[in-house]
Image (cartoon, grey):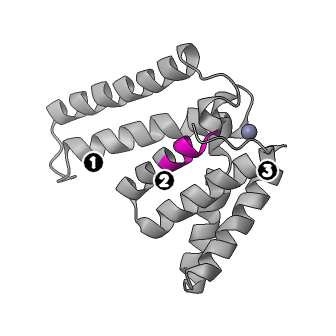
Amino acid sequence: MNWPEHMFIGALFGLILALFLQLPIIEGGLVAGMAAISALAPDIDHDSSKIRKISNITVPIAAFGFSFAATCSEGVMCTLDDMRSIIILGLAITGLYMIVITFFKPKHRGITHTIFSALVFAIFIYIFSDLNFAFAGFAGYASHLLADKHIRMI
Ligand SMILES: [Zn+2]
């Protein structure tokens, strides 16, 4: 199954979840969007997947954004020293991602295509956002496994 279909099914799951949680229209839309993106996540183990192309761009951006936020939360008070740590931390995170994805890439439809990974993914989202988005992440991720007809616990 290709990524547009996975996204569509993920969005559908997200919409059902939004209805189930009786979310207001805007939040419901965000939850559906989150589920649609999450539905692509399991194929991170595939070199030519859409999510890999997205990650290869967003991971470095997010890494530097995170480094910036973690290093000088004051924003305007960023010193030259802060800038140096931001660049080092940003490069370190990006490098780690590249190393993992290049040398420790899980085999296709291996660990990434499990309920266990869906849970880890949801917990990760919960840490950075809230419970509704975590549910959306889980729903989207799980929808991918259902669509692949590849459902394993671990
Ligand atoms: Zn898949």
Disc 3 vs disc 1: which is toward the camera?
3
Mark 2 and mark 1 lie on one chain; the one further toward the N terminus is 1
Quadrant holding the N terminus = top right
Q: Nearer the viewer, residue 103 or 115?
A: 115
Dot 3 amino acid type: Ala
Residue shown at 70% from the left, 44% from the top: 151
- Residue 9 % position (x, y): 77, 59
- The residue that mark 2 highlights is 122
- The residue that mark 1 highlights is 69
**Residue 13, relative to residue 140: is it above or below?**
below
Residue shown at 66% from the left, 22% from the top: 107
Dot 2 amino acid type: Ala
Disc 2 vs disc 1: which is toward the camera?
2
Q: Which residues are magenta?
A: 114-119
Q: Is mark 1 within 8 Å of ligand 1?
A: no
Does the stretch in magenta take in 118?
A: yes
**Residue 108, relative to residue 43: is it above or below?**
above
Tag 1: Cα neighbours inside 10 Å, few (<14), some, or many (≥20)? Answer: few
Alpha carbon distance from label 2 to label 3: 18 Å
Q: Is mark 3 within 8 Å of ligand 1?
A: yes
- Residue 31 % position (x, y): 58, 69
Residue shown at 43% from the left, 21% from the top: 95
- Element type at mark 2: helix
Residue shown at 40% from the left, 65% from the top: 130
Alpha carbon distance from label 3 to label 1: 37 Å
- The residue that mark 3 highlights is 147
- Element type at mark 1: helix
Does the stretch in magenta take in 79?
A: no
Mark 2 and mark 3 lie on one chain; the one further toward the N terminus is 2
